[in-house]
Amino acid sequence: MTQKQTYFEDIAEGTELPSKSWGPLDTVDIVRFGSAIDNYGKLHQDYYWCVDNGFSGGVLINGPMKQALLASWLDGIAGEAGFLKKMSIQHRGMDYADGRVLTAMGKVTGTREEDGLGYVECEIRLENSQGQITCPGTATLILPKRGGGAVPTEYEAPSRYSEIIGRIMGTRSQA
């Protein structure tokens, strides 16, 4: 299902961003994500190790996963013609992979037009099913203007998957 494009004209200071939830999250989700980013720490995979070392809730959801969830959510809000310009978050609380649901929420704190583009400043957060805000932060979206074209990206993506893999493998073999 494709999300409706959000335009700069649809947003005003104080607008609540549509929330998005993930979960219930369990160890399998965390191990799968950890494998994708080459993060095999016991803290994010081994329930018994976590409990033996004082983490009574068990396996922890890692910070990069929480950051990826927020970035994915914001990218969805920006839509096909928009762009997530920047995001800054803080990890202020631990979330366990014990069936918790994580929900991204936020609101618009400011808007401005610059070079024909619509900049949207946001306050964002990731909240767990216990009502704790464990990842507060800020973000800047660039949204298209109604009747205008897509927001230009600031980089040129590699044209082929093999180029990306070649760079990754080349970097690893030199390590």
Image: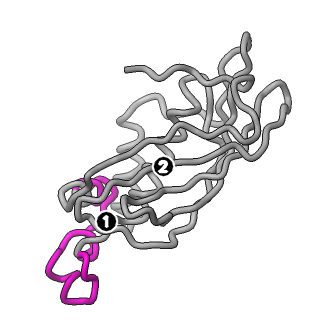
Q: Tell me where residue 99 appears, x and y as whole percent.
A: 23, 59
Q: Secondary structure at mark 2?
A: strand
Give above or below for 159 relative to 97.
Answer: above
What residue type is disc 2 on? Ala
What is the number of the mark on residue 104? 2
Give above or below for 119 relative to 50.
Answer: above
What residue type is disc 1 on? Asn
Q: Residues within 10 Å of mark 1 (few under 14, many from 20)?
A: some
Q: How many marks?
A: 2
Asked where in the image residue 161 lies, by quadrant, the reply is top left
Q: Give me the C-alpha separation between circle 1 and circle 2.
A: 23 Å
Magenta-highlighted residues? 32-57
> Are the residues at dot 1 and dot 2 in contact (C-beta closer than 8 Å)?
no
Give above or below for 142 relative to 129.
Answer: above
Q: Secondary structure at mark 1?
A: loop
Residue 82 forms part of the magenta stretch: no
Quarter of the C terminus within the rendering: bottom left
What is the number of the mark on residue 133? none
At 64% from the left edge and 45% from the top edge, which residue is drawn? 107
Viewer-proximal residue, 126 or 48? Answer: 126
Question: What residue is disc 1 on?
Answer: 39
